[in-house]
Image (tube, rainbow, N blue to C red):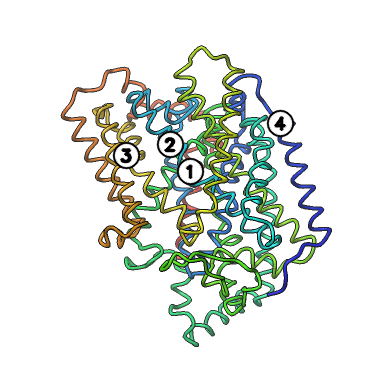
Amino acid sequence: MKDLSLSPLDIGIIIVYIVGIIIYGLKKAKRKDSEEYFLAGRNMTWPIVGISLFAANIGSSTLIGLASDAFKTNVAVYNYEWMAAVVLVFFAVFFLPFYLKSRVYTMPEFLERRYDSRSRYYFSFITVVGNVIIDTAAGLYAGNLILKLIFPEVNSTVIIIVLALAAAAYTIPGGLSSVVHTEVIQAMILVVGSTILTYYAFSAVGGWSGLMNGLHAQIDAGKLHTTTKEIFSLVKSSKDPLMPWTGLVFGVPLLGFYFWANNQFMVQRVLSAKNLNHGRWGALFAGLLKLPVIFIMVLPGVIAIVLYSKMDISSLHYYTVNDATGARMLCTNLSQCPNLTYPVLIYSLLPKGVLGLVIAGLLAAMSSSVSATLNSASTLITMDFVHKMKPGLTSKQLVRVGQIATVILVVIAALWAPQIDRFGSLFQYLQMVLGLIAPPVVAVFLLGLFWKRGNANGAFVSLITGLVIAIFVFLSEMYGWSDTINNIHFLNKAPLLLVICMAVHVGVSLATAKPSVDKVENMTWSTKIFREETIELKGLPWYKNYRYLSIILLLLTAAIVFWFR
């Protein structure tokens, strides 16, 4: 592969972007009080809410992860994307009204109102840990993956620190308002860059027919042990190593529900909406934006199978960790280091100027996801721990606490990011860790909203049970304690853990006292709420009625899934 270098034009575009986005973020800062700093004054309109949700989700780690899995003939990775639309409809219908009406700052705060402070503190701690080791660290890792190829002589730690400081430059002083407004710009760059790359990739491979002919040629030569139908199929067999159909049906929705309906750094954007309608429209708009991802972010990874399977990438001097020995190993082809698929695509295909724009888009995606998680984690630390321990702090003092917390979290994430290499595929790392964190939390949220008999004891014991099991499973995977457990696909482990946690929740709740009236009266869903809402929606035109919009979104999603079934 050719040596990698950037033209002065590319470097200029990247520098202008970085400086410009920091200045823009600082101009949009709101930090007069804690509500402005952590929730942007609760005044965001639906387009900003929707684009912000999309940008925070489609970070650089997701871009690299989607292309990586698609290169491994796993177009089924798109199931995570379209499932988001389904989950967001469920979220908008059932959960969002309770979140907004309760005027909470955080998801753990909502759990305290439904259960007690024990559940709040547990979920706050788990969410902060998850945001740091899953989202923030993965974003920094992905940014390092791109820049390390250009500057191989620079230590990865230095690159990660620089990226972290760039993302924190406007997050620390500006709060959620800076984060959300910069995400709108970043999402535009991201989509434009991905679309341009897709155009050049299809041009290089000879269009759709060239892609299919190239795949057939590799299959006939025995280099791909599959079929083109299997490559593009979203529904795999139960034995599929990357996404069995059982994992699609039970595991993917569970992870999606946690990510979109319970995760602080995503829900925080919807909490900033000016009212319930804008929150709902924004959530549905984010679901709509997820649908084209298969065309502009997944298919380029498949094209790389035809274009670059034979490419020698040893000149990139990129190392991975050997699964068997734990030793560092030089990558000589993409099969050894599939995480390099997206970087190889952009450096090989894009001309000068355009390359700078796409790298700027990647840095935009990285800073978007990192700033999002930093802000949400600092919100949790400030509002769920410090404010509870020192309720006398003023709003300005709380803002300062949030800023200090952000600095500390940046350092921790930067230290953890290099360890991700030990987990192979970046996307698999993200989903595996999420699959262990999510089930206990989803269990208490679902039972809390739809089962009035669920009480605080049941919730807390369920959360602790899930945590103990998750730690054991994680350590078993790292040190090989149990082949039986390790051989279960992580998308099948997650729903099994969910069932266990729900059973514990139900058992303990029934064995202990009923929850008080104030814990369930305004915190659980009922058909009465649906009937009252139906009356309220009668005066709205169809294009403002979230129910009609939800149906349209589900139909569009079903059409794409049917096409790639």
Viewer can see residue 526:
yes
- Decide which of tag 3 and tag 4 comes sooner along the chain: 4
- Decide which of tag 4 and tag 1 comes sooner along the chain: 4
Q: Amino acid at mark 4?
A: Lys
CA distance separating discs 3 and 1: 24 Å
- Decide which of tag 2 and tag 1 comes sooner along the chain: 2
On the image, the x and y values in percent for residue 136 come to: 55, 44
Q: Amino acid at mark 2?
A: Val
| Local secondary structure at mark 1 | helix
Which dot marks residue 93? 2
**Of labels 3 and 1, the one closer to you:** 3
- Decide which of tag 4 and tag 2 comes sooner along the chain: 4
Which dot marks residue 443? 3
Q: Residues within 10 Å of mark 1 (few under 14, many from 20)?
A: many
Q: Residue at x 61, y 75 (%)?
A: 308
- Whether pointer 2 and pointer 1 mark residues with C-beta atoms closer than 8 Å, the reply is yes
Q: Nearer the viewer, residue 5 or 449?
A: 5
What residue is shown with label 4? 28
- Decide which of tag 3 and tag 1 comes sooner along the chain: 3
**Of labels 4 and 2, the one closer to you:** 4
CA distance separating discs 4 and 1: 31 Å
Looking at the image, residue 430 lies above or below residue 19? below
**Of labels 2 and 3, the one closer to you:** 3
Q: Amino acid at mark 3?
A: Ala
Q: Nearer the viewer, residue 150 or 21?
A: 150
Residue 251 falls left or right of residue 100: left
